Image (cartoon, rainbow, N blue to C red):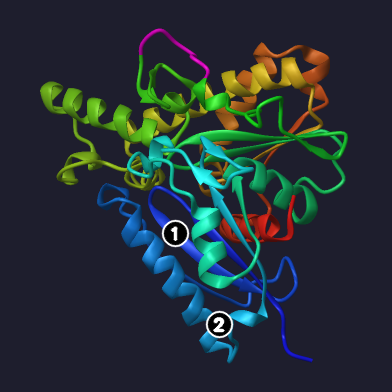
């Protein structure tokens, strides 16, 4: 019997990954490339198509072996029609009908899903969310969003828009995320960390304070900040701690409103561990209702760097 495979496509503002699997959560092969959203969607769509063909060819398969394709991407998007609607980290991807494009190209069913929802299902089935009836998964990459599991099932909301916690305004001023100053995404995402870091470096130069971050020319990234913090840089450490504290405020809101059993966090918080999660847990415990806070675990995503791959494959199977 000929092999049958699932294809997952994880589209982010920084990179796009394409994976192939015969049985979840195992990933048999994988390729990735820089998304470069400033160049528009056409280049990336071409590379996605070529990447799928290359992965199949490597395994001696043709397109007839594909059971389905799943695309995981940040919102906003139209899941039903399969259209990516210019997410903040993919601003040039305006109304891209990716479901129809890949469906026509490969002659198979293609599903599209918000990456936070996809990540929530992946962690609930195969990762840190196993056994939790009520769980929240937070993406913490270029942007920030939430996937919500209630009574063991994904909660979508009336318009398929549940979980857009990144759009909530946390402060009147502050870094911009989700096109809103002082938003949760502005304070607790990679894009927000980069904005805070640029201002902090400018301030350090004026005050003649030493920081490893001044060695970076041009735009700083969250990765630069976290790396400097791990080396004990005072400015970077302060930025990371502040990010953790702001994240803790977000966790407290989620705990008070949804009373989850577990909050699973991927991306930056997963990579930095207690540097961010320590302050976040502390603020959550102080600000949330005591009983609800005591009942909620805050843990890093167990799937690690594989979460985007497994999430996209879950989309291929259908959430």
Image coords of residue 165 (percent x, y): 58, 25
Q: 225 or 313, which is in the foreground?
A: 313
Q: Residue 255, located in which quarter of the rendered image?
A: top right
Q: Residue at x 79, y 53 (%)?
A: 125
Which residue is disc 1 drawn over?
Answer: 16
Give the residue drawn at x 49%, y 79%. Answer: 53
Q: Nearer the viewer, residue 27 or 293?
A: 27
Q: Is residue 254 above or below residue 201?
A: above
Q: Nearer the viewer, residue 59 or 254?
A: 59
Specify start and end residues of the magenta stretch as a single range.
168-173
Q: Position of residue 250 (x, y in %)?
A: 59, 21
Left or right: 129, with 227 as reference point: right
Can you give x and y, in whole percent of width and height, for residue 158 in the image?
71, 24
Q: Tell me if 209 is positioned left or right of 17 in this view.
A: left
Q: Residues within 10 Å of mark 2 (few under 14, many from 20)?
A: some
Callout 1 secondary element: strand
Near mark 1 (Cα within 10 A), the count class, few <14, some 14-19 or many ≥20, is many
Task: Determine whether, in the image, residue 302 is placed left or right of residue 73.
Answer: right
Give residue 254's quadrant in the image.
Answer: top right
Q: Which residue is under mark 2?
A: 56
| Quadrant location, the N terminus | bottom right
Q: Which mark is residue 308?
A: none
Marks 1 and 2, how far apart in space?
Answer: 17 Å
């Amino acid at each position: 019997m000929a092999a049958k495979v699932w294809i997952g496509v994880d589209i982010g503002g920084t990179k796009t990954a394409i994976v192939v699997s015969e049985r979840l959560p195992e990933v048999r092969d994988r390729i990735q490339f820089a998304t470069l959203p400033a160049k528009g969607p056409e280049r990336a769509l071409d590379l996605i198509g070529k990447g799928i063909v290359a992965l199949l060819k490597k395994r001696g398969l043709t397109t007839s072996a594909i059971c389905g394709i799943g695309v995981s991407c940040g919102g906003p998007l139209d899941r039903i029609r399969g259209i990516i609607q210019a997410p903040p980290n993919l601003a040039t991807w305006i109304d891209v009908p990716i479901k129809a494009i890949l469906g026509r190209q490969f002659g198979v069913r293609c599903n599209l899903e918000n990456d936070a929802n996809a990540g929530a299902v992946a962690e609930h089935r195969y990762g840190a969310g196993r056994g939790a009836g009520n769980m929240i998964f937070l993406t913490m990459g270029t942007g920030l969003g939430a996937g919500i599991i209630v009574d063991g099932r994904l909660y979508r909301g009336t318009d398929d828009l549940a979980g857009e916690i990144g759009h909530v305004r946390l402060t009147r001023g502050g870094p911009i995320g989700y096109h809103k100053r002082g938003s949760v995404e502005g304070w607790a995402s990679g894009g927000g960390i980069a904005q805070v870091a640029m201002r902090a470096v400018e301030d350090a130069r004026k005050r003649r304070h030493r920081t490893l971050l001044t060695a970076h020319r041009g735009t700083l990234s969250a990765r630069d900040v976290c790396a400097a913090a791990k080396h004990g840089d005072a400015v970077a450490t302060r930025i990371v701690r502040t990010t953790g504290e702001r994240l803790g405020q977000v966790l407290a809101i989620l705990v008070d409103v949804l009373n989850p059993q577990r909050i699973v966090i991927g991306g930056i918080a997963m990579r930095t561990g207690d540097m961010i999660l320590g302050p976040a847990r502390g603020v959550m415990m102080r600000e949330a209702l005591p009983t609800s806070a005591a009942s909620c675990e805050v843990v890093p995503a167990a799937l690690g760097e594989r979460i985007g791959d497994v999430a996209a494959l879950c989309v291929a199977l259908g959430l």
